[in-house]
Image (cartoon, coloured by chain):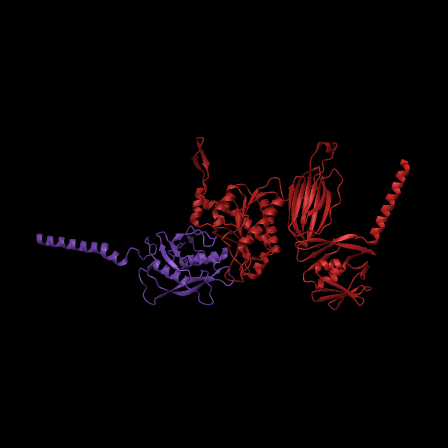
Chain colours: A red, B purple
Amino acid sequence: MNVRSSSSFSAILALGVFVLASTLASQAPPSSVLTVLARDSRRPIAMTLVNDQEFVALDDLAAAFQLAVREEAGAITVTYKSKTIVLTPDQALASVSGRLVSLPAPPARAGRRWLVPVEFISRALAPVYDVRLDLRKASRLLIVGDLRVPRLTAKYEAVGAGARLTIDAAPRVTSTVQQDGERLTIKFDADALDAPNPLIAPQPAPALVQAVRLVEPSTVSVELGPRFAAFRASTAPVDGGMRTVIDFVPAQTTAETPAPSTAPPAPTELPPALSQPVSAIRTVAIDPGHGGDDNGVTGPGGTKEKDLTLAVARRLKAAIEGRLGIRVLLTRDDDRAVGLDDRTALANNNKADLFISLHADGSLRKTAAGAIIFSAAFPRDAEQQARASLAPEPLPTFGGGLRDIELVPWDLAQFRHLDRSVAFAGMLAQQLKDKVPLASPPVAQAPLRILESANMPAILVEMGFLSNPDQEKALAGADLQTALAQTMFESVVKFRDYLATVPTR
Amino acid sequence: MSGHRTLLGAGVIAVAAALAWLLFVALPGRYGPTGKGVGSAAAAGAAPTAPAPAGRKIKARLFYVAEDGMRLVSVERDVPFGEGTVQQAKEIVAAQLAPAPDPLLSAIPAGTALRALFVTANGDAYVDLSRDVSAAHPGGSIEELLTVYTIVNAVTANLPAVSGVQLLVEGKEVETLAGHVDLRRPLAGNLSWVQ
């Protein structure tokens, strides 16, 4: 009785599954999804596979892009504003505002709906549509408008005892890498990412890295395995893009110690990393110039210096913190007025090792252009005063006795760091020269108030002239801001390496 | 004999008295406390102390924004003669603050006026300008440097007795004009900002 009941149930279940499968087949279920990505929305459009060709329904496109579709006299007419696209059911062609374009297949009917090959979007719709349509068929992505959606390609490989993850982003965008518990997050300065998910095949356990996947529109998450101990991240521009390299260092466990051997242990073949264990730069102070009531220079197009300096400062902070793992202080992180002494006081009191003040220039001559990097200059008598003050002075201490204390006048604090400031200015100019327009000469020394009280190497970067309409436009754009932040980041790395070669003070 | 001695003594006293009058009354009254020599320790206020002879001019180097906007150019121009360092410095600064003739372009904000000018014993000039020099300044390190060194160079390049210039605004020391160049101490002339 039990056996018979069981057999009957199985037969009914099998029949039900067959019926359900048949029903779905007759409705031509979507085989995949095309993601339509706009600035404020992300919506799926079903794609149907017909003869190995991906199709989308015309009425889905009509709903998404405000198209009117009507069928008459054996033709399908798609209208967008005053422009028309005419399709013929049995022809792999479309007439787009009177111009013929080819399609990989003719339109196909599915019940009462018309399907068109997905290439219809790029070849027929994009030419008549007001906003840019970028169809990325391989990643089933349709980008509407001027969004930054870099393509990511990832490679994961073993290197010595460790491993390396290489992610190329094209076109070029900056990224920051941060450890967040048992995962690293790689945040790209983009609206979305065009990448397979997961980015790499799952790794067998025990691994340094278990998985790499997209978790947010512009973030990649690297899930760390039990062997993970540390990482080093670096970023460098490559042809047409930006390459992020993360080297993973394994933990040294006794369980995995190989048997004693007469051969010397193989060195860990990790490349030079950007974040060395001991660094002469542990804290960087970034000073976005002006703020609050003080707009600084305002360009003819309305760009305010205070906004530009803050935008670049934030990018630079993210780059330095994310890739070097060192502390970055901003003298202001919003639109407010901060006194000049308060700015250097923040750097001095936090014992910053480098001070970078960001500004944009202005000139009565509209043609004036180019970035300039300033270091401080002192009048002759101030130099004499500073030299005299550098001699230690014995002062009584709280517990009794005397102690040699260096008393450096606040407004002359920069004096003893001046040679290093000049060196850093030169390095930055060298790094900037192929990437942004530079003034001639690109470095200068001047009695700039903000630099004189900085008790560490300090420079002021005038990133370009907001008074020049062309420069204003470029400076207000993400590309130049990214290039400036990236180049300043690279210069910080160079300067850190330089400091390792000169005697400490 | 005694009469002669008395007469000689009276003459000596009279000459001494005349010399004393000349030294302590007549000459100071004529030249006043401001002095006129280079390096004089005296100071002068805004009011002219000794009007220049009408029409007399000197050639002075004045400074304007170069074509590229990144430097100054110096131009030799006629400036009214001023009696003494202070008065001459005032004439030079006044000429520098005046609207620039075409095609020259001044780095000094329009409307800036000279309020006062002093020269100290050690050769530092204090140039007190109206608030327009700061309030109407367009900003930017380069533009601010050009504004400051227009004045500093105009005074130091034409008056060898002046070695440094400190700008004041509305009679007070200021940190900067627009957030960049330190004005808390006198600045020496700097021709590296001149083409």
Relative to B95, A296 lies left or right = right
Task: In the rendered view, tell whether residue A456 sits above or below residue B105.
Answer: above
In this rendered view, identify the residue nearer to me: A198 or A262. A198
In this rendered view, identify the residue nearer to me: A217 or B24. A217
Horizontal and vertical percent for residue A315? 60, 50
Task: In the rendered view, tell whether residue B153 sits above or below residue A327.
Answer: below
Q: Is residue A191 visible?
A: yes
Task: In the rendered view, tell whether residue A437 sits above or below residue A96.
Answer: above
Horizontal and vertical percent for residue B168? 40, 54
Horizontal and vertical percent for residue A84? 73, 66
Residue at image point 64% right, 51% down: A189
Q: Quadrant of residue A83?
A: bottom right
Residue at image point 16% right, 55% down: B14
In this rendered view, identify the residue nearer to me: A58 or A456. A58
Q: Quadrant of residue A37?
A: bottom right
Residue at image point 60% right, 47% down: A318
Q: Is residue A491 visible?
A: no
In this rendered view, identify the residue nearer to me: A152 or B7. A152
Judged from this view, the residue extending furthest toward the top is: A400
Question: How many numbered callouts?
Answer: 0
Judged from this view, the residue extending furthest toward the bottom is: A98
Horizontal and vertical percent for residue B8? 13, 54
Q: Quadrant of residue A496?
A: top right
Relative to A166, B149 lies left or right = left
Relative to A189, A197 lies left or right = right
Judged from this view, the residue extending furthest toward the front is: A1
Residue at image point 87% right, 41% down: A9
